[in-house]
Amino acid sequence: MTTLIDGQPLPAAGGHPPVVMQVWGEAALFTRPELKVERVTYPVPTPTAAVGILESVFWKPEMRYQVVAIEVLKPIRQFRIRRNETSDLPSLAEAARGARRVDTAAHRDQRNAVCLRDVAYRIHAHIHLQGHASKPVAAYRDQFRRRVTRGACFQRPYLGTREFAAYFGDPDDTPPINRSEQLGIMLHSIDRSASREPAMTWFTAQMTRGVVRIPEHGIPAGLPAVAGA
C-alpha cells in the first residue's frame, strides 16, 4: 500500500507505509535557532518537534521514529506574546544528561515571542526497530494506532513549548493548505547516543502546497550563526 500526498507517494519502509497522526492546538512555537533577541517560530513544526509529539503518545526503547512528511492543515497565522524565560541555560549536553539544575526564579527574563495561532498538522512517520527488538514492526505500528484512536499518551504532547498543549487523534481527509515557500535551514535530528556533545543535523526545508517532506538524513553541523551576536 502506497501513501499519496498531493498525488505524490511517500516512501515505504520494510513494505509498510508511514503511520499517521493528526495534531492541533490553539497555539504553537517552533523556535528558529539563529535568532537571539526574540523567539521567532518556524511556520511549521520541525522534525524533532514532530518526533517529540509522537513519542509522547507511544515510545519503546527498541524503536525510533523517522518523520517523512508534515501536512499543514490550517492557514499560517502569527501573533506576539511576552513570555517569562530563564537566562540561566544549560548546554545541550547538560540538558540531555540532566546534569545541572536551573534556578528559574533567580534568573528570570522576559522575551517577546512570535508564535502561531490555531494550528493543525498531519504527521507521517516510519517506525524503525533497534537490534534488540523482540517483536515485529507490525506490533508497534498496531500499538501506536490503538493509542492514537483511544487518545492515550505517556505525557500531554505539546506544540514546541509546554504551555501550548496539543490535541491529537486519527487522521481525517482535511486537505493541506495551498501555500508554498522556502522555510530555510531547519533542525533535522539530534543524536544523543554518544557520550560526547550531542550531534545535530540540518536540512533545507521547503513547503510545497502545504506539505513539508523530510529527507531521511540531514547534514551534520553545529548551531547556525546567531543574528545580532
Image: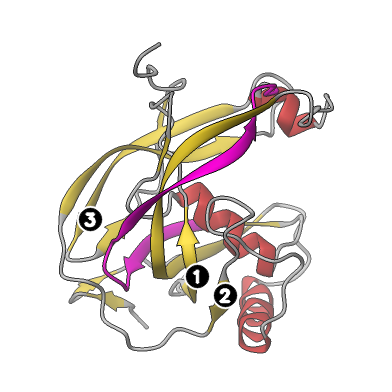
Magenta region includes residue 88: yes
Please tell me which residue is depicted at 35% across the width and 14% down the height of the picture.
228
Circle 2 is placed at which residue position?
Answer: 167
Q: Is residue 196 above or below residue 26?
A: above
Give, as a three-letter code, the residue at label 1. Gly
Name the element at disc 1: strand
Main SS, magenta region, reads strand
Asked if labels 2 and 3 touch by Cβ distance under 8 angstroms, the answer is: no
Q: Which residues are magenta?
A: 65-90
Q: Can you tell which quarter of the image residue 146 is in?
A: bottom right
Pick the residue in front: 111 or 92.
111
Q: Identify the residue position indicated by label 1 in the image.
A: 25
In the drawing, what numbered circle is on residue 207?
A: 3
User: Camera-side residue: 102 or 221?
Assistant: 102
Spatial CA span between label 3 and label 2: 23 Å
Q: First in sequence, mark 1 or 2: give its number.
A: 1
Circle 3 packing at 10 Å, graded few (<14), some (14-19), many (20+), is: some
Q: Are marks 1 and 2 in contact (CB under 8 Å)?
A: yes
Tell me: residue 143, above or below residue 161.
Answer: below
